[in-house]
Image (tube, rainbow, N blue to C red):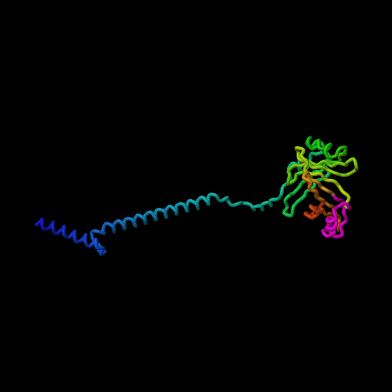
Amino acid sequence: MLAVNHRSEKMIRTIVMGVCALNLGLLSACDQGAEAQKQATEAARKAAADQVAGKDREIAALKAELAQLSEKPAATTQPQSASPAGPNLDAGIVRAAATHAGVTKVKIEADADGSLRELSLYHNDEAALPAPVLALLAQQYPGAKIRAYETEFNRAHGRLFEVEVLTKDKQECEYSATPEGVIVYNECHIDPKTLPEPIRKAIPEAVPGAKILEAEKTTFPDGRETYSVELSAGGKVHELYFEKDALVRHELVITAQLEVPV
């Protein structure tokens, strides 16, 4: 009886395996293991997804708590509006304006956006100039008489110093140099009648009815030349700057008062 049952069981398994081999898609012993594995995998995936979602909720809660802790306590008084940011004057010029001897004026040149292009302090304090700058006098204008000095901050060159002189032939000139004594430019007053013809024609077009107050010619070490013309029209003073006979800058001169700490 046992032998018969064993043979019958073996035969049944053979038949079932044959059916599986024919891919009849019957849910039997051959695919029960695969189905169970699929269900286990799906359950594991779902558990992992649930775990990640839980961590995301924890992180979101911690971020909200951190943001709340970072908030400043509410002000108990009426808050004051913040002061608008503005351009700063060069600190060295401000100090020099209060300490240099014979200070006569401060000249500020600004661009349309409010940025400062140049800040100049006019004074008579020879001791405030570096020795290399003073040593250039004999080289640039031999026998000239010093009239005044300038301490400048120039956006393009940084700290500069100028020496204004009256030359032996009575010409008003000045030279500008770095603290190390490197010449940046030379500038001299000229007769407005000697201005190049294109510049003389451009002046009335830029400022109709203007009267020329003075004209200057600036020469650079590389041979480049520029011209500046100061004009009066309608009770206002204008400055025109020319390079290669073309007007490159038109400025209005405004009288100002500067207060500095002592």
Tell me where residue 11 appears, x and y as whole percent: 16, 59
Please, which residue is most extreme toward the left here?
1
| x, y percent for residue 121 | 80, 43
Taking the image as shown, residue 14 lies to the left or right of residue 167, namely left
Observer-nearest of 126 and 228: 228
Q: Is residue 229 magenta?
A: no
Q: How many marks?
A: 0
Asked which quadrant contains residue 180, the reply is top right
Residue at the spot x=76%, y=47% of the render? Answer: 118
Q: Residue at x 72, y 47 (%)?
A: 88
Could you tell me which residue is drawn at 90 percent across and 43 percent down? Answer: 170
Q: Quadrant of the N terminus?
A: bottom left
Residue 46 pos. (x, y %)? 37, 56
- Viewer can see residue 194: yes
Up-down: is 19 above or below 221? below
Q: Quadrant of the C terminus?
A: top right
Q: Look at the picture and state if 128 lies above or below 213.
A: above
**Is residue 97 rendered to the left or right of residue 13?**
right
Which residue reaches farthest front?
Answer: 223
Task: Check the image and report above or below for 215 versus 127.
Answer: below
Query: Image check: 168 left or right of 134?
Result: right
Q: Nearer the viewer, residue 170 or 66?
A: 170
Given residues 236 and 219, the one toward you in this image is 219
Which residue appears at 77% of the width and 50% of the height?
A: 109
Q: What residue span does the magenta drawing correspond to? A: 193-215
Residue 165, quarter of picture:
top right
